[in-house]
Amino acid sequence: MRFGVVVFPGSNCDQDCFWVVNRVLKQSVRYIWHQEADIRGLDCIIIPGGFSYGDYLRPGAIARFSRVMKSIVKFAKRGGLVIGICNGFQILLEVDLLPGAMLPNKNLHFICRDTYLRVENNQTPFTHLSSAGQILKMPIAHHEGNFYITIDGLKRLQDNRQIVLRYCDAYGKVDSEANPNGAIDNIAGIVSEKGNIFGLMPHPERSSEDILGSDDGLLIFQSIKQWAKTR
Amino acid sequence: MLKVEIYITLKKTVVDPQGLVIKHALESLGFANIEQVRCGKIIILHLSLRSKVKAVQQVERMCKRLLANPIIENYRFKIKK
Amino acid sequence: MTRITKEIYQSLGLSDLLYQRILEILNRQPTLTELAMLSVEWSEHCGYLCSRKWLRLLPREGRFKTLIGEDSGGIIVDGWAIIFKMESHNHPSQVEPKQGAATGIGGIIRDIFTAGARPIALLDSLRFGNLDDPYNRYLLKGVIEGIQGYGNCVGVPTVGGEIYFEEAYTGNCLVNVMCIGIAKRDELKRARASGIGNAIIYAGASTGRDGIGGCSVLASAEFAEGEEKRPTVQIGDPFMEKCLIEATLEAIATGFVVGIKDMGAAGLTCSTSEMASSGGVGITIDLKYVPRREEDMQPWELMMSESQERMILCVKKGRERDICNIYSRWGLNAVVIGHVCPDKTVKVKHNGKIVANIPASALTNPPVFDMPYREPDYIKEIKKLNLSVLPLPTDYNSTLLRILASPAIANKHWVYEQYDHMVQVNTVVRPGLGAAVLRIKDSKRAIAATTDCNSRYCFINPYRGAQIAVAEAARNLICVGAQPAAITDCLNFGNPQKPDRFWYFKSCLEGIAEACRFLGLSVVSGNVSFYNENPNGAIYPTPTIGMVGVIDDVKMINTQSFKKDGELIIILGNSREELGGSEYLKVIHRMVCGEIPDLDLSLEMRTQEAVLNMIREGLISSAHDCSEGGLAVTLAECCVSQEEFMLGAEIDRLPCICRPDALLFGESQSRFVISASEEYFARIKQIAKENNVPLYLIGRTTKVRKLKILNYIDLPLEEIYKSWYNSFVNYLR
């Protein structure tokens, strides 16, 4: 299958995503410059982390209007797989492909450390190789990852099983102590209603090789690869 | 030329951690009677327009499309000559 | 033409002597622009007038092949060049901590990628006054905010560093930042102009009035009131820098870039004159092409501006468009502002007139001064320490907990978790577990990096203190399994015009040179920061050492935490009754005195080699060097530094007949605490013996979550963890 990794000015996890898809997952991948409109031939689009356009105004607010995003919105609406990691998640929220918004972390600091995540829905293209309730170790690295949504919106996410990953402790307990950034309902990652668009704050590409402390994140990439194969 | 001052604040229902920290800091400096602190941002624009009506329409669109995130933020603005 | 008066040149920081030299070189009165250019190039910050004579002592060759460029240097490992440098941004940070630190990070990153290397890691060595002073807390928080704001955005991981607190830094904090980059060896670029007729291209941010005179004024005057100097502080834009990194590396890859240099201190002046001088050519530029942000800028303002995120490139004639297009694709300015010419002068045009015409070599070769130095009288006094009148602790448990909770020793996760230390997916050993380890993609090898300096030692005994800084940095690298390879040094001292300050500088430099030579380390780059003073005197002499080491096989690395219960705990090296200058004396007895620990470089080297061999053979489970806080702190850290997997230790014998406080908290050098499975003990003993290194078996790791040391210490790990892990943030409230 063929992956595309979007590059905005200020993206800084683009090369990491490329590396993991290309060298660890061993799949074909190319960069997509933010001014490109033609994304034909790609099976999965990765919107990587970083500080697109410096995160000026609000993270993701300016990236939303870039040329490539218009094509990605069309691609996603036709059912194409899109995964937004960290800043990529923030962009997906700004462009309304996913519901909700990001607030600054509750401690007002940038937080870079490992977190544990419980798989709440393993029936998505991004998590189907994991078991229900499986605990994954992946790092977070962000300043605005405090996911917010209205009560009604939250209920819709819950009812539709759109919550995919929640912050938990090493044993799977989901509580406020295990919540690093104040995200509502400990939400770390959600999918769109149809399940083909995935946004998450933790970095699977930073936890795809044992030598870096965890390869749990590879499960996400492998799920995508496997999913595409069976379609 | 018109000068526009746009104020963007978090909606009342949204927690404002920055506001809370500022409130605590002010209190620890001895300022009493602080009910609430909310923190936001100001954006100042200069428009080469004469018509206030047109300016209002344009700034409305700017706020809705880019400057404020309607899920968490409110905006209001003042237009001065 | 404006007549140059004494007032004018003195206000630019030039002495009568230097002004006379200028008149001799030019054979005429300089223009204002020329005078401004010379004043910045001949400032201590750019010109190293006082220090250059002594810097020649530093070895430029070592165990690894060394490259030394104009703005940075490095080592060669296989086909890779590992380029690194450390630089100070002390005075700007004291004035405006957030922007000061941020622009420090921006500047050091530019020094690395202008060499053609991709920046892969940052480290920062910070020093502040005591945290009970609110201004020092403000400085600390501001500096950290600046480092995280800039470093996280540009996507270069901050993987290590250190933070210390001493009263001597109140009024003059130290912010020393280090960047490491990697390139294929043949992709490196020099900061040289060459090829008559080649274009000089300006790339990056527009020029404003920020930091005008910052480099000579901010870096060369002693500090009284910081706040009034605020206007000369530069503002950094990490987003622009990130684009500049990508565009520049792309530009270099075209092969059309002949030479390249960033505009840091002294902006256009420094970059044009140094590019011309090191290339043995001349450069002519026309200021009308320089992109600017403010109106009515004078030529000298344009030449001196320290606006951030700007570079100068020398590009092959005819290829200007190719290069400018790359920058404009990244949304950056890139314009031809001049060209290379044969006559070895720097010529500046403004409004059709030549406003400066100076031999390039005159700019870059300021006079060298031979500064007088003298050992201060108080040295003999502070070396005195009468242990017989020093009371022993009544409770060793609480003594250990107090030392673990002291701001210098306590875990700094509150700081390093605010830094993105994982971006670029190379970080194998993260902060908090020893020296940082970064893998090299597509290679079995990895590199390790650390910074170190015990400035209290250097205050008491600068020669040995500086040697210890080098030795300890090397020990940190050994512990992760790296062969120490080379250093960069950031030399922070007081006013060099004062002979006692200069004696400290000279002594530290001799110490570094000697230790590096002995341990086979080259000095690839560095920076001198003088005039670090406050109204109460100079800072502690602080020769910060940034060291890089090489790991042959990234799978054979090691960390400091105990890994398995029931393993042997062994100490290598000699423990003596050495309490002078220790953390224990400072924290518990509030004393800064006594001769600092002895250092036997030969034993140091042998012990390091022994430990490295043990790690390479896969014999040991953990290694941690004994440094500040002594053996008890080392053992405590081995027990608790892996949060999710803490192990206890029972120490039932110790190899020293001396006071128990010296035994537990003394800081004898060249010591390592290692743990290993029993089956490897014979081989470990053999390696120690072959290297003639003292080895003592002192106890075992235990499942029982306690640290027990003879009859002195008996503490649950939870208590140790709490003091060590949670204390730091409490000092900031």
Image (spheres, coloured by chain):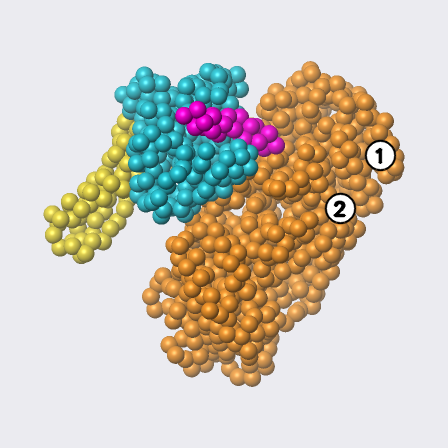
Is there any visible trace of residue C389 in the rendered image?
Answer: no
Q: Nearer the viewer, residue B3 or C197?
A: C197
Report the amino acid beneath label 1: Ile
Residue drawn 16% across the image and 48% down it: B55
| Few, some or many residues within 10 Å of mark 1 (<14, 14–19, 20+) | some
Range of residues picked out in magenta? A206-231
Disc number placed over residue C615 in the picture, else none? none
> Closer to the observer: label 2 or label 1?
1
Residue drawn 63% across the image and 66% down it: C49
Q: Which residue is mark 1?
A: C687
**Looking at the image, is C262 positioned above or below residue A64?**
below
Q: Left of A30 or right of it: where is C544?
A: right
- Residue A65, located in which quarter of the rendered image? top left
Q: Colour of chain C?
A: orange
Write down the chain letter for disc 2: C
**Looking at the image, is C130 positioned above or below residue C726?**
below
Report the amino acid beneath label 2: Lys
Disc number placed over residue C383 in the picture, else none? 2
SS at mark 2?
loop
The percent coordinates of residue A186 (x first, y second) are 41, 22
Chain the render paints cyan: A
Q: Nearer the viewer, residue B62 or C717?
A: B62
Q: Colour of chain B?
A: yellow
The percent coordinates of residue C89 (x first, y second) are 54, 53
Q: Left of C703 or right of it: where is C275?
A: left
**Looking at the image, is A143 positioned above or below residue C562?**
below
Magenta span main SS: helix
Q: Which image quarter is the N terminus of chain C in?
A: bottom left
**Looking at the image, is C276 positioned above or below residue C148?**
below
Earlier-in-chain disc, 2 versus 1 = 2
* Membership of C97 in magenta stretch: no
Q: CA distance from mark 2 to mark 1?
A: 37 Å
